[in-house]
Amino acid sequence: MEDFNQTSTERFILLGLSDAPSLQVLCFLVFLAMYIVTLMGNGLLITVVRVSSKLHTPMYFFLSNLSVVDIGFSSTIVPKILVNTLSKDKSISRVGCGLQMYFHMALGATECLLLAVMAYDRFAAICRPLLYQTIINKKMCHCLASIPWSVGFSGAIIHVPLTFQLPFCKSHHVNHYFCEMPPFFKLSCKDTWLNEIAMYVAAQIIILFAFFLTLLSYINIISTIFKTSSSQGKEKVFSTCASHLTVVSLYYGAIMFMFLKPRSAHSPEIDKIMSLLYTVVTPMLNPIIYSIRNKDVKETIRMKLCRQSNY
């Protein structure tokens, strides 16, 4: 039965991060801890923004969207890692693999564009302070938030069917810990040139567009900072952008390395590490980075905790 499951055309075997038995329990505990921190951190951030009227601003609205994306992103990948780490059966159905690939791509593109939207919001707030309420009004705020979700979830519909229509006659053993496109191209006995072109073109359009929009926003922000005569004003402006810049550097760096390099440069082990950065590590770090560097969030959490203790 086990041999049948492993050779069935309806299932794939995820080889995971390591096959060393001594590392299985350690990996399980590390990923479980990271997943719990991700859920608790992002869940707390969403709750704090909802309960505090002081945080009902465009910046925190976009930040809440980012937390929702991070919870979904991590939940698409980590639970399967936890199951496969301790289970002997590391297989995943074709449907399950397709769904995992779809939501991974959709949420990944959504986060990429959402970071660009957040950079534009900071540009409008810092460089156009008198017009900020007019530029980022409630209608525009919801419109800007809907674009990343729409583009991310519609774009992924194209790539998943293109990938799974390939004949996987070389092997059904995927040298990865989740269903991502590049490892699947290596399993096909058919030329995957068109699939790779489609992936690179889509990745370049989304990633590079989001990156250059973010870069342009921060060039203007930095220019405005240098024009500010007050050192206190410079420090305040920089502190509002430092958290976002940290998140952007982590996420864009990993995702560009993964999807914008040629096929010949792909190394399975390095690809796994880079994928870990943007699928597991970044969703965990995002709420921590924003909470630690954000006075409003820390003050709101402190006030709520004090009220609870008084009761």
Image (cartoon, rainbow, N blue to C red):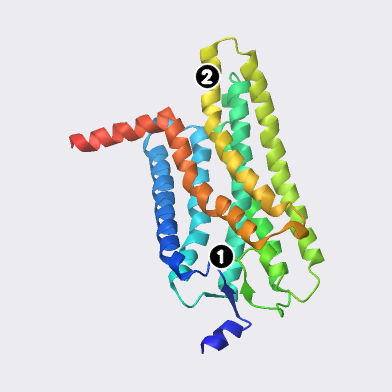
Marks 2 and 1, how far apart in space?
A: 42 Å
Say whether residue 75 is left or right of residue 310: right
To which residue does mark 1 refer? 177
Q: Nearer the viewer, residue 103 or 259?
A: 259
Tag 1's secondary structure? loop
Report x, y in % for residue 176. 60, 65
Please name the amino acid that badge 1 sits on. Tyr
Instruction: Identify which amino acid the numbered label 2 is placed on.
Output: Glu
Q: Position of 152 compared to 41: left or right?
A: right
**2 or 1: tag closer to the N-terminus:** 1
Dividing the picture into quadrants, the one containing residue 171 is bottom right
Secondary structure under tag 2 reads: helix
List the residue tagged with mark 2. Answer: 235
Question: Crowding at label 1, few (<14), some or many (≥20) Cα neighbours within 10 Å?
Answer: many
* Residue found at x 62% / y 38%: 117
CB atoms of marks 2 and 1 within 8 Å: no
* Image quarter in which the C terminus is found: top left
The quarter of the picture where residue 223 lies is top right
Could you say which is closer to the camera, residue 52 or residue 275?
A: 275
Q: Is the residue 228 above or below the residue 3 in the image?
A: above
Instruction: Tell me if I can see residue 147 in this picture.
Output: no
For image coordinates 58% across by 43% down, the residue present is 250
Residue at (49, 42) in percent of width and height: 286
Q: Residue at x 78, y 53 (%)?
A: 201
Determine which quarter of the picture holds residue 99: bottom right
> Residue 193, image x and y in percent?
81, 65
Q: Is residue 16 visible?
A: yes
